[in-house]
Amino acid sequence: MTDHAPAMPRAVRVWESQLAVYRRVWKSNVLGAFVQPLVFMLGMGLGVGALVDEGPDSTAILGGVTYFAFFAPALLATTAMFIAVQSSLWETLDQFMWGNQYRAMVSTPLTPHDVADGAALWHATRVGIAVTGVAVVLQFFTDTRTIAVVPAMGAGILTGLAFALPITAYTATRQDDHSFVLVIRLGMIPMFLFSGAFYPISQLPAWFQPIARLTPLYHGVELCRGLVLGSLDAGQAAIDLAYLLLFVVAGWLACRATFTRRLQP
Amino acid sequence: MPTVSAPVIVARDLCKRFGEFVAVDHIDFDVEAGESFGFLGPNGAGKTSTMRMIGCVSPATAGTLAIFGFDPATDGPRIRARIGVVPQSDQLDAELTVLENLVVYGRFFDIPRAECRRRAAELLEFVQLAERKDDRVEPLSGGMKRRLTIARSLINEPHLLLLDEPTTGLDPQARHVLWDRLYRLKQRGVTLVLTTHYMDEAEQLCDRLVVMDRGRIVAEGSPRALIEQHSTREVLELRFEVGRNEGREGDLVGIGDRTETLPDRVLLYVDDGESALAEVHRRGHDPVGSLIRRSSLEDVFLRLTGRSLVD
């Protein structure tokens, strides 16, 4: 009988089962991971970029770079956020309620903690695939072609988890998906627009800037951009990193707690 | 390690509360190895809550529970490694094929992939789904999904199989196929614990059962012993014209051990149905319909709780 210690952390088994389902949809999903950032970079870079770069002070405001170089690396963080949210709202609730996969898992040797950890691993994988797509597309353009994109991918994945884990903990407390649209409309979309992805937050009114700094997305964008453009300030980077890690660790602990309450009532 | 002859499950003073609501109220029971044990009761009696505690997915609020001699609170994963669970609603992965469902589930027990495939092939034969192994789960019928769920619950070669209302919602033919498979498992020595609110299911499958009502155990024994103890050999069912079933008890006193008036019929608990019916006619009653049948667990339940099993 299987009384001995498992060959691998049990959370890996949860991850494996998610992969088994993903294998059915991976083609369209991976294709999207490349096409979407490409379309975005071409559209924004050609259109808005041409407009902005002609402005008198634009280069100074953007820190000495073109508009394309300014906004394109931020897509590592914003893409990570959106994929994380997709993975941690409906796709997670489905496994609690409609598909019931999580409930089936905890009737095996897996514990709610294993399931929470496995969900976290899976979010990291989903975000990783999307961030890789952005990173590859960044290499098509001279402004953003750099080996430093590799650590920037890490920053992107961390940004994704800073959203995925707290939201997953929240999803584990839900009996329906009514609030999910609000999470996106009142949380993600404003963050997407006001966290310094498309313009420096110094352009915002002075009273609003501290609010922008409170969002994890701001810190993710700063890290990704700083790494790709080589303009990173070590002290600021440490703060960004610590801030994201705070969300990741707090979210992870919250997941373990809410999964236990949900799956072992 | 526990000895082989020790009971598989020992529960003492077991309680489960959700806030103010008492789902399971101080129950005691033992389940012996190789036995087929049932929890019979209406919806809300506490059967599922008890099953979830045995399955180590719901901690007991009070009392003690030991499964294979282990404590679910501290040894949940170790206990769950040896039990199979067939939940009330199928929890199959609709995105995956029949075979994939078994293999993915087997991996949760840390069973090597090749071994999962080998066992899956065998189990699909056992539940008569071998030719559907590469089909997606979704188009399968309710009975097939149930059988697949049973196959899945056996992937870890469990010593104890928990079945929560295994045939609810299935048509009679699918139920008989399922009962046959469960009977074969029992013959292989698997301990079966099931809940049901079907009397015929309990009579078919259970060596011993407890009747639950409002979180408590109100009777325990083999189906036959329970019927002998709490009911008579036969039951005479009388049907009178609409609205005329009530108020007859007085006239029928003494014909049987007791009478029970339901909205649509009057039940007389008797040892000999034929002579009882003759006596009913002799007293001048003229029922529009009558039926003599053997006592069932339904009668036991009615006697013990004053209510029908299926509302």
Image (cartoon, grey):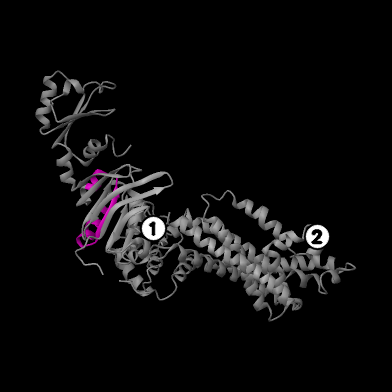
Q: At 81% from the left edge and 59% from the top edge, which residue is drawn?
A: A206
Q: Position of residue B36 (x, y in %)?
A: 22, 55
Q: Tell me whether marks 2 and 1 sit on the same chain.
A: no
- Vertical side of A59 occupied by B63: above or below: above
Q: Report the amino acid beneath label 2.
A: Leu
Where is residue A210 drawn, in percent x and y?
Answer: 75, 61
Q: Is residue B197 visible?
A: no
Please say whether residue B187 is one of the residues in the magenta stretch: yes
Say what secondary structure mark 1 lies in: loop
Quadrant position of the N terminus of chain B in the picture = bottom left
Q: Residue at x 86, y 71 (%)?
A: A60
- Mark number for residue A204? 2
Q: Is residue A178 above or below residue B190?
A: above
* Label 1 crowd (10 A; few <14 / some 14-19 / many >=20): many
Towards the viewer: B12 or B29: B12
Stretch in magenta: B176-202
Q: Position of residue B85 (x, y in %)?
A: 34, 58
Is A218 positioned to the left or the right of A169 in the image? Answer: right
Which residue is most to the top?
B284
Number of residues whose C-alpha sits closer than 10 Å to that of mark 2, classed few (under 14), some (14–19) or many (20 or more): some
* Secondary structure beneath label 2: loop
Q: Quickly name the residue at label 1.
A: B57
A35 in relation to B48, above or below:
below
On the picture, is A207 further left or further right than B125? right
> In this orientation, does residue A246 appear?
yes
Q: Separation of disc 2 and disc 1 at Cα?
A: 51 Å
The furthest residue to the bottom = A147
Instruction: State the mark number for residue B70.
Output: none
Check disc 1 and give the amino acid type: Val
